[in-house]
Amino acid sequence: MSLLTIRDLHITYGAGPTAVPAVRGVDLTVDPGRKLGIAGESGCGKSTLALAMLRLLPATARLSGEILLDGEDVLTMKWGRLRAVRWAGASIVFQGAMHSLNAVHRVGDQIAEPLLVHRQASAAAARKRVGALLEQVGLPPSRASAYPHELSGGQRQRVMIAMALACDPRLIVADEPTTALDVMIQAQILRLLERLVTEQDISLVMISHDLAVLADTCDRLAVMYAGRIVEEGPARDVYDAARHPYGRALSAAFPRIGDPASRLAPRGLPGDPPDPAALPPGCTFHPRCPSALETCRSEDPPLVQAAPGHRAACVLTPGSPA
Ligand code: SF4
Ligand code: MG
């Protein structure tokens, strides 16, 4: 059975005629111990989707569909159960650790908190576990007494990972975990996260705008555009042989190491993603799509099985119903 199953998830902010759709009919699964990357430009709904997985969205968000974690629906579970699930079932690593950590508490106390609250650990046991967690993320246990401002950006993100690991979750959701860091540190943190989830058989959902980073880290990749998944499949296939014009544009937007031709390829995609409050009719990508046909202005193609285990939503991609 899949560890995480998302079925026909819709998320809207606000209500009535001014309601803004952020996520539109997402279906996804993550198997135990596997890593799923979710890619897309800012505003495509990927952070909303990540937060929904732990039911962390603001009260203005209206959700329908199912988010099953180990068969239990996160969206309908009782508050007490949800609190337990948030650390031991699934935990989250946010972008920008400076804002996610509490500036006035020592990082060791922050890592210990879920252990004290959710594991009813004794103070001594929590302290011991904090030391071990810091070592796992490559920090000396003595750093437990540091305040967030005394650590570098990379060290703070290591602390965030230690916190996420504290209660042995089965799933970690990482939303742009390295975006604020410089490239060298980024690579170190990604390798660390990848190694720890692999060693501990934790499933990973990683959100990023950078398809190359995701292709390097994850087993499967989903590409989001205007609140929908437009492509999903094995990571290398989506990165090297995308079936959707948007997937192709995203994968061409980042240089490939060791591929001189890619350095000459035009970067980026002209235009901006659509305003979620005023989505174009038909395929929402048609105003920017280099392959758009007349029919794309009125027809919104469903996701179809374009190849084994590889779905895409484009009129130019034939396939069987997904
Ligand atoms: Fe482009 Fe049409 Fe395919 Fe949309 S359906 S991605 S507009 S070709
Ligand atoms: Mg985001």
Image: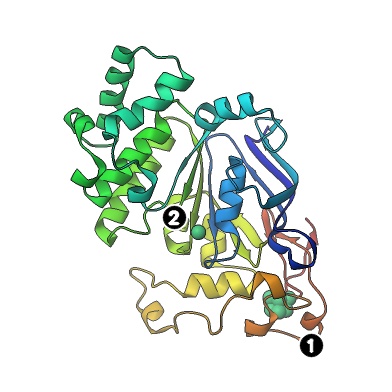
Percent position of residue 22, x then y? 66, 61
Q: Secondary structure at mark 2?
A: loop
Q: How many marks?
A: 2
Position of 138 with respect to 172 (left or right) is left
Amino acid tagged 1 = Glu
283 is higher (above) or lower (below) than 99: below
The residue wearing badge 1 is 294
Task: Report whether the residue tagged 1 is closer than 8 Å to ligand 1.
Answer: no
**As drawn, 317 above or below 228:** below
Sequence-first disc among 2 and 1: 2
Q: Is residue 179 visible?
A: yes
Q: Residue, x 77% and y 69% (percent of image)?
A: 318
Residue 292 point in image, percent of width and height:
70, 84
Quarter residue 106 falls in: top left
Q: Nearer the viewer, residue 15 or 206?
A: 15
Tag shown at residue 307: none
Give amino acid for label 2.
Glu
Q: Quadrant of residue 126?
A: top left
Q: Please tell me in which quadrant of the rendered image residue 5 appears.
A: top right
Mark 2 and ligand 2: say if the CB distance to the nearest ligand atom is below 8 Å.
Answer: yes
Q: Position of residue 244 (x, y in %)?
A: 64, 70
User: Which residue: 73% across, 71% down?
Assistant: 314
Q: Residue at x 66, y 62 (%)?
A: 227
The label on residue 176 is: 2
Q: Is residue 228 left or right of residue 238?
A: right
Q: Position of residue 50 (x, y in %)?
A: 56, 49
